[in-house]
Image: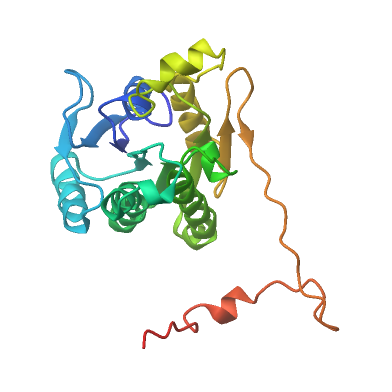
Amino acid sequence: MTALDGRIALITGGSSGIGLATARRLTREGARTVIADIQPPPEGAGELYLDVDVGDATAWEAAVRLIEERLGGLDVVHLNAGVALNVADPAQLSVEQYRHIMRVNVDGVFLGIRAVLPALERRGGGAIVATASLAGLTAFAIDPVYTASKHAVVGLVRSLAPVLEPRRITINAVCPGIVETPLVGEGVANLRAAGFPLLQPDEVADVVMLALNSGRTGSCWAVQPGREPVDFHFGRVPGPRTPGAEGMAPPLAAMMGSVRVDTD
């Protein structure tokens, strides 16, 4: 038996690439897997397939409700769905393309977290892993908007970890380098011709498992070919030098619920 025996696991973008590899790995570990995607997975992948637009809050609510009705609950969530366009010049990117990237890559993670939290809490806790990218940890000039979306995922995961920990819910991110998936498309041949090493989806699925089993929360696991996964270290930002408050961090407990954003 494993820790995942009988657990209910949801994987978005689970019909191909990293998501499909993770779904298959979780199934081998004994989990009952649900694949959410806009296209069906290969036959035999996952116990349940749901056609879900991850950028639609209503679709998320319906999906979670159906999972609980059909399978009895939800324990593990891999928020993996993502898109990229590989457009470097913002002037060449339409507003619609920009919004599509943000809708899938950022809204799809935030709305997913928002929708699954009550279901995880009804099971006494659970685990969330989001697929970010090395582009969420550094600049990636080939696709600045994709980079911005993955920085947003990293920031969301790190900021939510202390909020969710008292609710017995862990949240982590995997941050792979370039993976040989449909997202890379024709670029795979060019990268191979240049001698650049690519990750395989199964290698990233292994790190999803590591994130689930590590007992940590708020970690961002960097994944590169030929090396062990790294729990990426974020340095501290400069603190104040005001006399009497040198290095003081914001009193978050005091600020919770007290910060208002003016909209007029």
The percent position of residue 182, horizontal first and vertical second, equals 33, 24
Give the side of residue 150 with respect to residue 9, left or right. Answer: right
What residue sits 68% from the left and 45% below the top? 233
The percent position of residue 85, horizontal first and vertical second, equals 36, 38
What residue sits 53% from the left and 41% below the top? 141
Q: Quadrant of residue 28?
A: top left
Q: Quadrant of the N terminus?
A: top left
Give the side of residue 95 with respect to residue 175, left or right. Answer: left
107 and 24: which is toward the camera: 107
Q: Quadrant of residue 131?
A: top left
Give the side of residue 187 with respect to residue 219, left or right. Answer: left
Residue 38 position (above or below residue 114): above
Residue farthest right in this picture: 243
Give the side of residue 16 with respect to residue 149, left or right. Answer: left
The percent position of residue 225, horizontal first and vertical second, equals 57, 20
Residue 84 position (above or below residue 263): above
